[in-house]
Amino acid sequence: MELEITRKHDLPRVIKHLSCILFMSILAISATAQYADEARDIISELASRKYAGRGYLDDGHLKASNFISKEMKSSGYEVSFQPFTFPVVTFPGKVSLSVNDTAYEPGTDFTVGPGSPSVKGTFPVIAISRSGFLNPTTRSQLFASAKRKVILITIGSRSDTTKTVVDSLYRVLSSVKNAKNSDVAAIVVHNPYEKKWGIAQSVQTIPTFTITRWFKPSAIKSIELDVESRLEPNVESRNVIGIIKGSRFPDSMIVLTAHYDHLGLMGRTYFPGANDNASGVAMMLTLAKHFAKVNPKYSVVCIAFSGEEVNILGSKYFVDHPTFPLEGIKFLINFDLAGTGTGGLMVVNGSHLKMRFDQLKQLNDSLQLMPLVKPRVAGCISDQCHFYKAGVPCFYIYTMGGPKNYHDVYDVPQALTLSKFDNYTKLMIAYIQRLMIQE
């Protein structure tokens, strides 16, 4: 959904005028601004243990929302909370797994399936290859013989872990983990290449685990499991909404968003979520602070969403229950995974909103701030999704390059150099200033 900017015969003059304004703005910004240090403080705070992974145990998500609210208020924003509820599976107690009496470390050596039920006991093991498990006949025979036993699925080599291969395995696993009247004690996937975790909203029938520690499957005689799982049917979380009214066009808004929630706790193991998405929150708050100081013509709205890791629920709730008319949004930029950038920026929706993307790319080409600005097709992979479906023009921007830690215990502040954060911020300031020019 794009608008014609101006009459065609005015375009060269307008572009020249805008380029001059933006170039002088960037010179002023570059001379004084160093944003990465303050961003690192925000990231380190939100990714610290006291926020419990910003999940749904120990009030981690609520503590994070309070911190963000205080940051917005300190910058001069009028702040409100938007509460909503949803179910989520939690692991409030013990989460342990031992192989042949050797205790494995949660998060580093194994993860529990996000929707797993409670399980406790020591069980014999039946090992089967990935290809064997995918065979319907072999799998049926296996389930018939695996009563009160653990099915151990082995992935032999990295060539077995291509996306196509792994997706086929987990599709089958999803179909069998809720098998009724099954006496299988648990299903364990031995995949040393997969350390990611997630969140579920319902409890499955059969407990599942992924072991990432190397071992010889044929040597496994028994696996001991002790996991406490609990379904919380009505977790109340909240979006944090901050607004500064525009001086000339208060009913027209530039909206900046980022989700603050993460995976939380798996027992006592917490997932810091530094890049995902304390870094995106840091970018949003950095820009919020800047634009609060410049008396913007348009209203600037910042929304920190909860529930993104739970099927993008926070932004869906907002779009279904907006606190201001969605028609007033001039443009929305969603920030996620903002902590790297050595490989440049990926702009989701850039292929569809070509005029807006070209403006961003041309700015970067002129200012030489990021190594690459690349368009991507629309995708329902973060909080911009529901806005885009509702007809709101928007981008979701994430950084490329650097550490690949994602949804694991290694996504820590120390892994982020933030070497491109200043330049990324300067580019976003220039682009938002461009968006604020009346069209």
Image: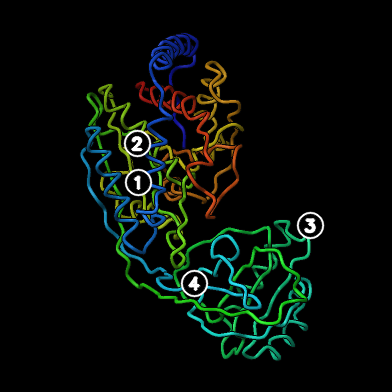
Disc 3 + disc 4, Cβ < 8 Å: no
Tell me the CA gap for discs 2 and 4: 35 Å
Mark nearest the camera among 2 and 1 is 2
Per the image, the residue denoted by label 3 is 159
What residue lies at 53% left-to-right and 22% top-to-bottom? 369
Callout 4: SS: strand
Mark nearest the camera among 1 and 3 is 3
Q: Which mark is residue 304?
A: 1
Residue 324 visible = yes
Callout 1: SS: strand
Per the image, the residue denoted by label 4 is 95
Amino acid beneath label 4: Val
Q: Earlier in the sequence, mark 2 or mark 3?
A: 3
Q: Residues within 10 Å of mark 1 (few under 14, many from 20)?
A: many
Q: Residues within 10 Å of mark 3 (few under 14, many from 20)?
A: few
What residue lies at 41% left-to-right and 13% top-to-bottom? 31
Q: Nearer the viewer, residue 59 or 140?
A: 59
